[in-house]
Amino acid sequence: MLSEHDGHLLLSIPLAALHRQTRWPEATVRGSRIIEFTDHAPPGWQGAQLLWPSAQNPAEFDAWAAEHVSALANPSANWIVRAQNSWRGVATALVLLVALCAALYVWGVPLAARGVTALIPVAADQAIGKNALNQIDGRWMKPSQLPPVDQQRLRERFLASVRTQFPNNTPSVQLEFRKSEIGPNAFALPGGIVVMTDELIRLVKDDDVVMGVLGHELGHVTRRHGMRQLVQVGVMQGILSVAFGDYGSLITTAPLILGSMAYSRAHEREADDDTIAFMQANSISPLVMVKFFQAARAYRSGANDNKDNTTPPGEGTAPPDSKQHAGKTPKTMQTPLGFSIISSHPLDEERMDKFRQAAQR
């Protein structure tokens, strides 16, 4: 109800209606006191604001509100106000927020991606994989120049090995050979398409090594890593867009890229475990993968003079251990923090050590 008193316009609102008609300011240490009117306020006042001048002491307003508007007191909010006014409360909230974000990143997003991926029909993977292969062909790949007899030999052995490992529920796998514009490589696409380049086969010159690499890619296929990666990136996009708004900004794209790399490393470790199972099921020594990673390093060193360990499996191959290391137990090396942030694959030494240990079992 509006009235006028001593030249001032007065708005009378029953105390019982204040909760619905206004949003009352919190009693923070600093800051203006602004009363906002909601859509339930009297006509003409919806969306209006009453401002207690910031030049005046907010404590005076709080004292007046505590004395005259005690009906607004909300006991459940008192601890929140106290926490906001305390650096300890703010610090505690920050720690809890960081812990929540870390838990969401480590467990929440992968778990959500697995659940969503399980609901997606396999036909979607196949459609995506075929489309990806069509885009790759002609851009980075050319028709294979490997002799047909060699293609047939490797394809038959690989498919037979897959049936040996999965006799009752054999996954659908399609092995393709290509001449590569990007050097020795092998990769798995969604839907069971595995591509191996002529350059890798000619470089390793060892069918057991080729089978080991294909077993790694089979792990990506059976775990649907391609689709899971797409889903996980989508989930991260949604979270970051909610958190930061403008998705195109660097502040959101940088965490997305780095986060995707971390998930890729997790997938590589899972595929390495599956490689060991594949080789053991087919009586292939896991040490062939040690030979492969050593060869990959030598290839990178010779072709690019590059000493890092960022190249994934399939992008080269390397000679066996040198004589100076013969008989010595290799030192286990874990992926350094700085490397793990910028690489999509674990450190070569970490992976080789896993295969060495598997060979001893």
Image (cartoon, rainbow, N blue to C red):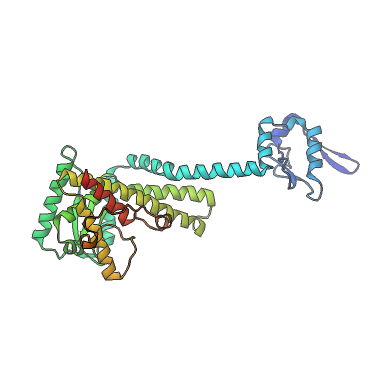
Residue 33 falls in image quadrant: top right
User: Quick check: 310 above or below 360?
Assistant: below
- The spot of residue 194 in percent (x, y) is 22, 53
Q: Nearer the viewer, residue 332 or 224?
A: 332
- The spot of residue 135 in percent (x, y) is 28, 60
User: Which residue lies at the image location 31% right of the left edge and 53% below the top edge?
Assistant: 331
Side of 65 relative to 231 (left or right) = right
Residue 110 falls in image quadrant: top left
- The spot of residue 274 in percent (x, y) is 25, 45
Side of 30 relative to 199 (left or right) = right
**Count of numbered marks:** 0
Q: Nearer the viewer, residue 185 or 51?
A: 185
Q: Nearer the viewer, residue 314 or 152?
A: 314
Which quadrant is the C terminus positioned in?
A: top left
User: Which residue lies at the image location 19% right of the left edge and 51% below the top edge?
Assistant: 174
Q: Residue furthest left?
A: 149
User: Quick check: 116 above or below 265?
Assistant: above
- The spot of residue 271 in percent (x, y) is 28, 48
Which quadrant is the N terminus positioned in?
A: top right
Side of 160 relative to 56 (left or right) = left
User: Which residue lies at the image location 59% right of the left edge and 41% below the top edge?
Assistant: 92
Residue 161 in view of the camera? yes
User: Quick check: 67 above or below 205?
Assistant: above
Residue 138 in view of the camera? no
